[in-house]
Amino acid sequence: MTLTFYTHPMSRGRIARWMLEEVGAPYETVVLDYASTMKADSYLAINPMGKVPAIVHDGHVVTEGAAICAYLADAFPEAGLAPPLGERADYYRWLFFAAGPVEHAVTNRSLGVTPTSDQQRMAGYGHLDLVVDVLEQAVSSHPYIAGAAFSAADVYAGSQVAWGLMFGSLPKRPAFEAYLGRILSRPAYKRAGEIDDALAAQAAA
């Protein structure tokens, strides 16, 4: 088994790193630079978008953070990071809600884009306040976003909430802070953060 992880320590690659640490399988890390190696032909052959993260697992390429989380949960079922097949409705729903409406709404607000009432019908997320309210309800309904057990959906959605509170793109509601308190104490999250923080310090030196 070969598993290679392409990333930058200050990127969405931190989500995939957390998921890899949760899985517990051995992997090789390739750190790319935004200005050079991320746009090199060798990496563009893996991800033509020239973005990270990406993984290559036994010759199979997976890009996009949510897809990587879902893929790794399926590829390493012994880690228990996906519900049984018949119980995945909430798992898929909230994993891709975080990757779709949450990501788009927060990005647009950060870019200064606020859809008008007419445009909200076209935008998949409607408007940011609606997305925030729905996300708050999702993290409040159960101990974890897809139910009683921690899953890959929490890795992705939890990362979005953590970044949102850190950078002020999501409001600091008690439900979000309580949710993060339940998931950010996990050993895999702490290991992943330590690895990427050390890589970021090396890059800055």
Image: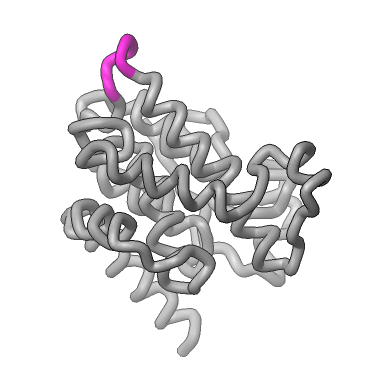
Residue at the image position 54 percent from the left and 47 percent from the top: 131
Q: Which residues are magenta?
A: 83-87
Residue 64, placed above or below residue 164: above
* Percent position of residue 4, x then y: 45, 45
Q: Is residue 8 left or right of residue 113?
A: left
Query: Residue reaching furthest bottom?
Result: 205
Q: In front here: 10 or 152?
A: 152
Is residue 23 visible in this depiction of the protein? no
Q: In front here: 180 or 40?
A: 180
Is residue 181 visible in this depiction of the protein? yes
Q: In front here: 97 or 151?
A: 97
Q: Is residue 116 left or right of residue 106?
A: right
Residue 74 occupies quadrant: top left
* Percent position of residue 60, x then y: 54, 29
* Percent position of residue 135, x then y: 43, 46
Q: Is residue 84 magenta?
A: yes
Residue 165, placed above or below residue 45: below
Q: Is residue 101 magenta?
A: no
Residue at the image position 46 percent from the left and 28 percent from the top: 93
